[in-house]
Amino acid sequence: MVTDDDELLRRAATGDDDAFALFYRRHRGLVVGYLRQRVSEPEHAFDLTAETFAAALVALRRYRPAEGAAAAWLLGIARNKLLESFRRGRVEARARTRLAMEPIAVDDEDLLAIEAQAVAGQASLERLLESLPQDQRAAIRARVLDEREYTDIARELESSPQVIRQRVSRGLRTLRAQLGERR
């Protein structure tokens, strides 16, 4: 059983569909939770999640493990898809179209599942964040989750932008290590 995200993505890039399916199942809740907090409709979060994973599948060969954790790469794609949807007033379907994916009909049961995944993903993220020292937790919430600028965070936390960068970096390094241990 492959447990390392980097290995799953490497195998998926060579055509191993099962590896990408495992990566998807592992991170679906995280992505849905991230997106659901930022959109008003669960259907929107569902569409954005589908487009995020389709875009990740298309971009597999561009993933570089040395540049950061796979989950962070995936959340970066989710953030870009979210911003695109805000700019265009709709969810883009380019990656899904490129992969010849049919639209997915969503019923009430699916919407409940989306909400449950969002809650579970958020709860997992909260548990991970709670394991960090308070200063790192506050810096990561502000920078990564709220997407604020280092200078704003530094002003609020009465520190320098360099110190905030260091807190974010240390906290993310700790989270990556914890995620690696949990797999």
Image (cartoon, rainbow, N blue to C red):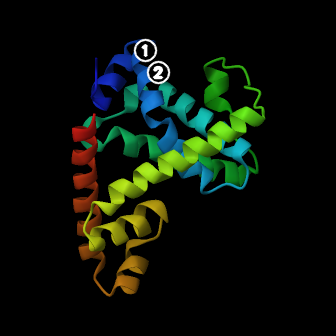
Quadrant in which the C terminus appears: top left
Residue identified by numbered label 2: 21
Q: Which disc, if any, is residue 18?
A: 1
Proximity of marks 2 and 1: CB atoms separated by less than 8 Å: yes
Considering the numbered disc 2 on the image, is that residue within a helix, a strand or a loop?
Answer: helix
Badge number at residue 70: none
How many marks overall? 2
Inspect this view and state whether residue 108 appears.
Answer: yes
In this view of the protein, which residue sits in the foreground, 66 or 26?
Answer: 26
Graded by Cα atoms within 10 Å as few (under 14), some (14 to 19) or many (20 or more), the crowding at tag 2 reads few
Of 2 and 89, nearer the camera is 2
> 89 left or right of 61?
right
x then y, percent, for residue 164? 29, 73
- Who's the residue at 72% across and 25% down the image? 104
Q: Amino acid at mark 2?
A: Ala
3, above or below 131, in the image: above
Other residues around mark 1 within 10 Å, as few (<14) / some (14–19) / many (≥20)? few
Separation (CA) of disc 2 from disc 1 = 5 Å
Callout 1 secondary element: helix
Q: How far across and how far down the image is residue 29, in percent?
A: 51, 40
Q: Give how far across and how far down residue 107 sits, in percent.
A: 78, 32
Q: What type is the residue that disc 1 sits on?
A: Asp
- Residue at the spot x=27%, y=63% of the render? 132
